[in-house]
Image: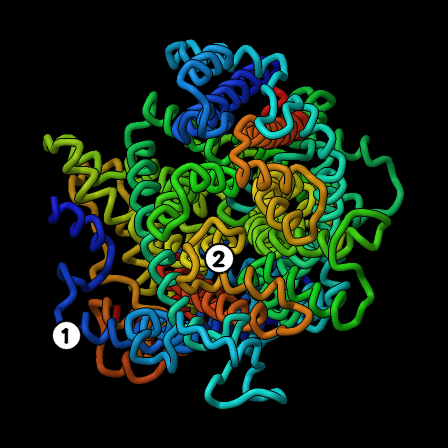
C-alpha cells in the first residue's frame, strides 16, 4: 500500500525518481521552520512553559491569602508595589501568580479539549465520508442535532449534573466540539475515497480498516491539524466562559475565567482583577489563531502551484 | 421541489426529536428529582408517593414516551421551584431575549457583512489587511470580557451608559454590542472567504471579458451568487448567538431566557432547563429550514427539475 | 510588410513581453512576440499548455493576471490604436465590443442564476446603444442555430447541453459585431461529436461576417481545418509562422516537425506514437539561448549561445532557428 501512495504522488513530476533524498528533505524542513510566524509560536510556547514551570516562575503562591494587602493595584499605578507586579485580588492573592497558574488550566483544557474533540470528530468524519450510505446518514443526523443545540446549554446541563471540575470541562468540550471537525473531514474523506489509489487498494484486496488507516487518515490529517490549532483558542475561551459562570474549575484553583468572575464584582474599585486575565486570554487566543491561519496556508495544496 | 421540502421537514422533526431525547437522558442522569423536591426529613412513603405522582416509577422508555407526547402539546412540566408551568416562565422571558438577539444580530450583520464584502473585493490591499486584522482581533477577544471591559469604560468610568438592567434603549446598547462581539468577527471572515470563492469563478471573469462594467459585475454576478452562502453563514452563527445570549444576559442582568436557564441550572430546576434547551434547538432548526427553503426558491438549478 | 498590407491588419502586436513575478522567481510567460492578423483571416496560435498562449489571449483583451503579471514591453495595435495605453474605462468598452472572446469552458462561463437570454444580451447591453435588446438576442441565437430561441431565452444554463451552451457563448461574442474574435480552445471542453458541429458553426460565422479571428489551441487538427495562417508557440516565443498548408507540408522548425510527427496517422498503421524527447523546461528556469535546444536533435553550440532571431524564409513564412537551412 505504501508504494501505491508513493507512486501516485510522483507521477508527472519530471526528473524525480521516487522519494526525495534525505538531504533535500532536511533543507525543506529548514525552509519551513524559517517561515513560522515567530510571534504566535512564541505565545503558544510561552503558554506551555508557564503551564509546566508555574511553580518556578510564579513569584507567589497563588493560593496564599494576605488580607492586609488586598486589592492592591499593579506596580505602575499609585499604591502598587513591585512585590505584587500586577496587584492583588480581594483576598490579597497575587494576580500575576494566579495568572501564571491559570495558564496551566488554559493549556490543559486547550490541548486536551482539542485532542479529544479532534479525535472523535475526525474519526466520525472519516467513517461518514468513506462508507457513505446509512452510516453517513446517521452520523450527519447526529451532527445536525449537536449543532442545533447551543453548546453552552449542553455544557451547563452536563456540568450541572456531574459537577464542575477540570476533567468535566474537558469531557463537555469534547462532547460538544467534535462536530466542528466532522463536516469538513467527511467532505475530504468522500473525495479521497473516490481517488485512484483507494480504488487500487480495494482491488488488491485490502481490508477497510487498513485502507482507512494508511490512505484516508494520513491525508485528512492536514485539515484536522489546522482545525485543531484554530480550535485551541476556542477551547480556552469556552473554558473561561464556563469558569466565569461558575461551572468551571473549582475555586480556589486559579483560572483566567474564574478571575474574571471575581474581578467583575470589584470592577468599580479594582479594575485590574478583571482586565489583566482577559488580556492574557486575548493574547493566547490570538497566538493560536495566527498559528492556525499560518498552518492552513502552509498546508494548502494550492501553495504548491505558486511556481 | 415540494418533495424536497417535505423531506427537509421530516429531517427537522427527527432532529428535534433527537434533541428531546438527549435532554431527557441528561435530566435523568442528574439524579432523582424527588431528592431535590422534598426536605431531607421526608419519609420513604412520601418519596414513593411523589415518585408515583411524577411518574418516575415507570420504566424509562415509557417515561420518554410520556414526555414526548407532553412536549408535543407544549407541556414542559412545572418548575420545581415555583410550581408554575415551565412553558409560561419561558414565554414571559422570550420577548426580552428576542429583543436582545435582534439588536445583537442587526448590529453584527451591519458591521460584519460590509467588512467582509469590501475586504474581499479589495483583496490584498491595505483595506483588506486592516479589515481582517480587526476581525482576527474580534475573534480572539472573548465576548464576555469585552462586555465587562465596556461596562468598566462606559458605565463605571464615563458613566454614559447603564451597567445592567432592562429598560429604555440605552440599556440594550452594551448588551447588544457584547452579543455582536461573539459572532461579528467570524461572520466577517466567512463572508470574505465566500465572496473570494465567487470572485474566482469563471463566470465572473467572463462577465468582465464581455465588457460588463466592474460595479455591475460585482452587483449582478458576485453578490447575487453569494447571497445564499451568506444567509447560511448568518443562520449558522445563530447557534453561537444563543450561547452568547446566555452569558450576555448573565453579565447585564437581562431578563431573558438565557438568564432563566442559568438560574434554573443553579437551582436544579430541570423542567425549565429542558424546556429552554428544546425550544432553543427548535428555533435553530426552524431557522435553518427557512434558509433552506429560501435557497430552493432562489436557485433555479433546484427549482427547475 | 508593405504599407498596403499594414493597413489591412486588424491587429498588430509588436515586441510584446509579459512576465509574472512570483515569490519563487520570474516566469517569462511571453517574450518578444510579434505578429499581425489581417482582416477576414483566421490566425491560429498553436502551443502546449504553459506555452503562454492563454496569456496572449488575455492580453489582447487588455487583461493581465494580477498581481503577479506585468506587461514588460510592447504594443498591441487594434486598427492602429495601442490598447495598452487605454484607460480601464476604455478597455471595458473595447472588451466584448470591438474584441470578443469565446472562452474554453461554456459551462463555467455562464452564471447559473441568470437566464441564458439575459447573459447573451449582456454584451449587447453595454456596447450598442438603443435597439431592441430582446430582438437582437433572439436574432443572434438564430444565427448560431439555437433551436426554439424564444423558449431558450428563458432557460437557465443547466438546462442546456454543452453544445448549446457553447453556441450561446458564440452568440454572445457575435452580438456586438466585433472586429476581432478570439477563440480560446473553443472545443476542448466539448464531446467529440459536438466539437465538429461547433467547428462548422464558427467557420460559417467567420466567413459570413468576414471577421478577423485568432484561434488559440493545442490541437493541430483544429488548426488544419480552420486556420489560414498558423504560428507555433514554444515557451513564450513564436518559433515558426506560415500559411497552414505550407506549415504542414514543409515545417522548418524542429519543434514544429516534432509536433507534426506526433500526430497519429491512420494510413501508415503505426503502432507506436512518436513523442518529442525530453520535457518542457521549468518556466522559472528557461535554458539559455534557444529554449528548444535541450530537446532538439539538431542542436549545436551556437544554439545555446543566444536566442535565435526570426528569419523570413519566404514572403509569408518565418522561423526562429539558426540552422533551418541545414535541416
Residue C35: x, y in percent? Answer: 54, 66
Residue A132: x, y in percent? Answer: 33, 27
Residue depicted at 48% across the width and 84% down the height: A84
Name the element at disc 2. Answer: helix
Asked if the residues shown at circle 1 and circle 2 are in contact, with their CB atoms under 8 angstroms apart, the answer is no
Residue A125, numbered label: none
Rendered position, B90 above or below B55: below
- The picture quadrant where one finds residue C200 is top right
Residue situated in front as seen by the camera: C85 or A157: A157
Residue situated in front as seen by the camera: C300 or A189: A189
- Chain assignment, label 1: A
Q: Nearer the viewer, mark 1 or mark 2?
A: 2
Left or right, residue B11 beside residue B166: left
Q: Can residue C246 be seen in this view?
A: yes
Name the element at disc 1. Answer: helix
Left or right, residue C149 beside residue A273: right
Residue C58: x, y in percent? Answer: 57, 59
- Chain assignment, label 2: A
Residue situated in front as seen by the camera: A124 or A194: A124
Label 1, label 2: how far apart the Cα atoms are: 46 Å
Residue A240, numbered label: 2
Residue pointed to by mark 1:
A23
Amino acid at each position: 500500500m505504501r508504494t501505491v501512495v508513493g507512486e501516485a504522488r510522483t507521477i508527472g513530476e519530471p526528473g524525480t525518481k521516487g522519494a526525495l533524498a534525505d538531504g533535500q528533505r532536511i533543507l525543506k524542513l529548514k525552509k519551513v521552520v524559517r517561515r513560522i510566524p515567530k510571534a504566535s509560536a512564541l505565545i503558544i510556547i510561552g503558554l506551555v512553559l508557564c503551564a509546566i514551570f508555574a511553580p518556578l516562575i510564579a513569584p507567589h503562591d497563588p493560593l496564599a491569602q494576605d488580607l492586609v494587602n488586598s486589592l492592591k493595584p499593579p506596580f505602575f499605578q499609585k499604591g502598587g508595589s513591585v512585590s505584587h507586579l500586577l496587584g492583588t485580588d480581594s483576598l490579597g492573592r497575587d494576580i500575576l501568580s494566579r495568572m501564571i497558574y491559570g495558564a496551566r488550566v488554559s493549556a490543559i483544557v486547550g490541548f486536551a479539549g482539542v485532542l479529544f474533540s479532534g479525535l472523535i470528530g475526525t474519526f466520525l468524519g472519516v467513517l461518514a465520508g468513506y462508507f457513505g450510505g446509512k452510516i453517513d446518514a446517521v452520523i450527519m443526523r447526529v451532527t445536525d442535532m449537536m449543532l442545533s443545540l447551543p453548546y453552552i446549554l449542553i455544557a451547563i446541563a452536563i456540568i450541572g449534573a456531574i459537577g464542575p471540575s477540570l476533567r468535566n470541562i474537558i469531557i463537555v468540550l469534547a462532547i460538544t466540539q467534535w462536530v466542528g471537525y466532522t463536516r469538513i473531514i467527511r467532505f475530504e474523506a468522500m473525495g479521497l475515497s473516490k481517488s485512484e489509489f483507494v480504488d487500487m487498494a480495494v482491488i488488491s484486496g485490502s481490508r477497510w480498516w487498513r485502507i482507512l488507516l494508511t490512505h484516508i487518515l494520513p491525508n485528512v490529517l492536514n485539515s484536522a491539524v489546522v482545525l485543531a490549532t484554530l480550535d485551541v483558542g476556542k477551547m480556552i475561551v469556552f473554558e473561561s466562559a464556563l469558569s466565569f459562570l461558575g461551572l468551571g474549575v473549582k475555586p480556589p484553583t486559579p483560572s483566567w475565567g474564574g478571575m474574571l468572575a471575581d474581578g467583575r464584582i470589584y470592577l468599580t474599585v479594582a479594575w485590574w482583577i478583571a482586565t489583566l486575565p482577559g488580556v492574557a486570554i486575548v493574547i493566547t487566543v490570538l497566538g493560536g489563531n495566527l498559528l492556525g491561519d499560518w498552518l492552513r496556508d502552509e498546508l494548502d495544496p494550492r501553495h504548491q502551484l505558486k511556481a | 421541489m415540494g418533495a424536497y421540502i417535505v423531506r427537509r421537514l421530516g429531517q427537522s422533526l427527527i432532529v428535534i426529536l433527537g434533541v428531546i431525547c438527549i435532554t431527557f437522558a441528561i435530566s435523568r442522569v442528574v439524579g432523582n428529582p424527588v431528592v431535590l423536591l422534598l426536605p431531607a426529613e421526608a419519609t420513604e412513603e412520601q418519596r414513593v408517593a411523589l415518585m408515583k405522582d411524577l411518574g418516575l416509577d415507570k420504566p424509562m422508555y415509557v417515561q420518554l414516551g410520556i414526555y414526548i407526547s407532553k412536549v408535543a402539546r407544549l407541556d414542559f412540566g412545572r418548575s420545581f421551584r415555583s410550581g408554575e408551568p415551565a412553558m409560561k416562565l419561558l414565554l414571559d422571558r422570550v420577548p426580552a431575549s428576542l429583543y436582545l438577539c435582534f439588536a445583537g444580530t442587526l448590529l453584527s450583520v451591519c458591521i460584519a457583512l460590509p467588512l467582509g464584502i469590501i475586504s474581499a473585493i479589495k483583496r490584498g490591499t491595505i483595506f483588506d489587511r486592516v479589515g481582517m486584522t480587526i476581525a482576527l482581533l474580534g475573534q480572539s477577544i472573548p465576548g464576555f470580557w469585552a462586555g465587562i471591559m465596556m461596562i468598566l469604560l462606559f458605565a463605571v468610568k464615563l458613566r454614559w451608559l447603564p451597567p445592567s438592567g432592562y429598560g429604555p434603549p440605552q440599556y440594550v446598547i452594551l448588551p447588544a454590542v457584547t452579543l455582536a462581539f461573539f459572532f461579528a468577527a467570524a461572520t466577517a471572515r466567512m463572508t470574505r472567504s465566500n465572496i473570494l470563492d465567487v470572485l474566482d469563478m469563471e463566470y465572473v471573469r467572463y462577465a468582465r471579458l464581455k465588457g460588463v462594467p466592474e460595479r455591475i459585475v460585482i452587483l449582478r454576478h458576485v453578490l447575487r451568487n453569494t447571497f445564499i452562502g451568506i444567509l447560511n453563514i448568518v443562520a449558522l452563527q445563530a447557534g453561537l448567538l444563543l450561547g452568547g445570549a446566555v452569558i450576555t444576559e448573565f453579565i447585564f442582568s437581562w431578563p431573558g431566557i438565557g438568564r432563566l436557564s442559568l438560574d434554573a441550572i443553579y437551582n436544579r430546576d430541570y423542567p425549565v432547563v429542558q424546556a429552554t434547551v428544546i425550544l432553543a434547538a427548535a428555533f435553530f432548526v426552524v431557522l435553518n429550514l427557512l434558509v433552506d427553503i429560501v435557497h430552493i426558491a432562489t436557485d433555479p438549478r433546484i427549482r427547475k427539475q | 510588410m508593405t504599407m498596403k498590407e499594414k493597413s489591412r491588419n486588424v491587429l498588430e502586436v509588436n515586441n510584446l513581453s509579459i512576465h509574472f513575478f512570483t515569490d519563487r522567481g520570474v516566469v517569462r510567460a511571453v517574450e518578444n512576440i510579434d505578429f499581425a492578423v489581417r482582416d477576414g483571416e483566421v490566425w491560429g496560435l498553436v502551443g502546449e499548455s504553459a506555452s503562454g498562449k492563454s496569456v496572449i489571449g488575455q492580453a489582447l483583451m487588455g487583461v493581465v493576471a494580477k498581481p503577479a503579471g506585468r506587461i514588460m514591453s510592447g504594443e498591441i495595435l487594434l486598427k492602429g490604436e495601442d490598447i495598452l495605453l487605454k484607460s480601464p474605462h476604455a478597455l471595458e468598452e473595447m472588451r466584448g465590443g470591438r474584441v470578443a472572446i469565446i472562452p474554453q469552458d461554456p459551462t463555467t462561463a455562464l452564471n447559473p442564476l441568470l437566464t441564458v437570454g439575459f447573459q447573451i444580451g449582456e454584451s449587447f447591453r453595454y456596447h450598442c446603444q438603443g435597439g431592441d435588446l430582446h430582438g437582437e438576442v433572439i436574432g443572434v441565437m438564430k444565427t448560431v442555430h439555437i433551436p426554439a430561441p424564444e423558449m431558450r431565452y428563458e432557460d437557465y444554463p443547466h438546462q442546456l447541453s454543452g453544445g448549446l451552451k457553447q453556441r450561446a457563448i458564440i452568440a454572445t461574442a457575435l452580438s456586438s459585431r466585433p472586429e476581432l474574435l478570439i477563440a480560446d480552445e473553443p472545443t476542448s471542453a466539448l464531446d467529440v461529436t459536438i466539437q465538429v458541429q461547433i467547428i462548422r458553426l464558427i467557420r460559417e460565422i467567420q466567413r459570413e461576417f468576414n471577421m478577423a479571428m485568432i484561434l488559440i489551441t493545442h490541437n493541430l487538427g483544429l488548426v488544419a481545418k480552420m486556420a489560414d495562417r498558423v504560428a507555433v508557440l514554444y515557451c513564450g516565443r513564436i518559433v515558426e509562422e506560415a500559411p497552414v498548408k505550407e506549415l504542414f507540408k514543409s515545417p522548418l522548425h524542429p519543434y514544429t516537425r516534432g509536433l507534426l510527427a506526433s500526430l497519429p496517422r491512420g494510413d501508415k498503421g503505426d503502432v507506436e506514437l512518436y513523442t518529442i524527447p525530453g520535457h518542457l523546461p521549468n518556466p522559472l528556469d528557461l535554458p539559455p539561448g534557444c529554449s528548444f535546444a535541450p530537446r532538439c536533435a539538431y542542436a549545436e553550440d551556437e544554439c545555446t549561445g543566444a536566442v535565435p532571431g526570426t528569419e523570413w524564409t519566404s514572403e509569408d513564412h518565418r522561423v526562429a532557428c539558426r540552422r533551418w537551412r541545414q535541416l
